[in-house]
Image (spheres, coloured by chain):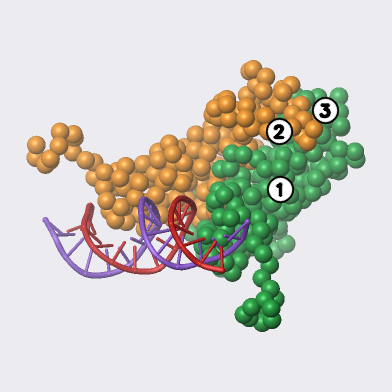
Chain colours: A green, B orange, C purple, D red
Amino acid sequence: MADGAGDGPARAPLTRERVLGCAVALADAKGLGALTMRSLAQELGVKPMSLYHHVANKDAILDGIVDMVFAEMELPSPGGDWRAELARRATSARGVLRRHPWAIALMESRAVPGPANLRHHDAVLGTLRKAGFSVPMTAHAYALLDAYVYGFAVQEAALPFGPDSPPDVTASIAAQISPDDYPHLVELATTHAMQPGYDFGDEFKFGLGVILDALAAALP
Amino acid sequence: MADGAGDGPARAPLTRERVLGCAVALADAKGLGALTMRSLAQELGVKPMSLYHHVANKDAILDGIVDMVFAEMELPSPGGDWRAELARRATSARGVLRRHPWAIALMESRAVPGPANLRHHDAVLGTLRKAGFSVPMTAHAYALLDAYVYGFAVQEAALPFGPDSPPDVTASIAAQISPDDYPHLVELATTHAMQPGYDFGDEFKFGLGVILDALAAALP
DNA sequence: ACCTGAACACCGTTCAAGT
DNA sequence: ACCTGAACACCGTTCAAGT
């Protein structure tokens, strides 16, 4: 009982890693809006001002958690089969962005990329270069692949249906969309997207295949 | 002088349209962070509480300005050449999202799509269906096209270089990226992306062409 | 060195009051 | 009907103080 009061274990010392890790967990659980210096401090069992000894300010926390998200993504190995490596990387990135849907909004507003972000994109570029793409073609391929991965995450996060949204919400939105005003949306929804077994996430493979096929055809 | 004090024209009456229009202008000029009920009211020459007579709350404003952004995008005509129509729509959407880069972050966090959003996507689906794509293939094409457009906008907004960022910022970031740690990023930047005349926006055409070619090949 | 209490200038929003 | 003043429960952050 040398720790002082309480029957719990000694509180781990506050570190930048613990602050950022808790911030990611809080954003995952309750959304970016619930991530405040005050709520974060409470979650860590500490007073708000203590956080400022480990991070410069809230912006530094936002930069930090975006880079933690990049760090979760599997890197492609420039050595292996470039198509398989880029597919694995894209699939991993999609999964990561699905687990942390708030990250997209931050990526777009943070100016300075973190080290995990830079390492990630350097590995993608390296894989393309080693596969034999020219520098200009690598730029094309990089922009296309990344746009697809990020954009798919945006779509998935914005979907009003899917496994993450409760069925009653889906139904109430569907009821407001009149077939007279939006015939093609209603057609797609009723005859396809709302059928049992449909998973929007499966669309990811199609688009990824299209892109990788086109890149393979552009190899010298 | 029946208007009362002042030499300016009579103040236009507050309306939902005027509130949303001013909110878009404020977000464009100073970013989403500067869009507060109080700053918006001041911009409109009114007290903060007056806004609540025209919009339910700030969330309604955010929903409203996202839909205004969708309303700016050119719709494809289901009648015409589907490839040209979808290319025009994608190019227009990219331009709109470039003018309103804050919109991406909102799209991802707003659950309920507005009428302009629905109309826009219904037109895209209609164009694909009229071109002869099956319903499942239309779902594939829609997901791929939209992911690309949104994702390209995310990339473009997150770019630390480009025509919108001051050259000195670009240079200071470049100086921090060591060729030892990120050799392929440095190669791409120095031999290609930072060359005079390079415009990241030009990458858009390449990816769009790849996608539309692949869709054309998938037509029955 | 690490943590904190009190305070400041902000938020969105409610409620009761003005015209 | 439309607008507003005062107030409430929040923010991020600074500064001076504690151990």
Residue A194 appears in view: no
The residues bearing labels 2 and 3 have C-alpha atoms spaced at a distance of 23 Å
Residue B48 in picture, x, y percent from top left: 30, 52
The residues bearing labels 1 and 3 have C-alpha atoms spaced at a distance of 24 Å
Question: Contact (CB < 8 A) between labels 1 and 3?
Answer: no
A174 shown above or below B46: below
Outermost residue toward the right in this view: A80
* In this picture, residue B64 sits left or right of residue B42: right
State the residue position of label 1: A70
**Can marks 1 and 3 be said to lie on one chain?**
yes
Locate the C terminus of chain A and report the quarter of the image it occupies.
top right
What's the residue type where badge 3 is placed?
A: Phe
B62 shown above or below A198: above
Q: Earlier in the sequence, mark 1 or mark 3?
A: 1
Residue drawn where x is 55% and y is 30% of the image: B165
State the residue position of label 3: A133
Residue A92 appears in view: yes
Foreground disc of the pair 1, 3: 1
**Can marks 2 and 1 be said to lie on one chain?**
no
What's the residue type where badge 2 is placed?
A: Ile
The residues bearing labels 2 and 1 have C-alpha atoms spaced at a distance of 17 Å
The residue marked by circle 3 belongs to what chain? A
Circle 2 packing at 10 Å, graded few (<14), some (14-19), many (20+), is some
The residue marked by circle 1 belongs to what chain? A
State the residue position of label 2: B177
- Counting the numbered discs, the total is 3
Q: Nearer the viewer, residue B121 or A55?
A: A55
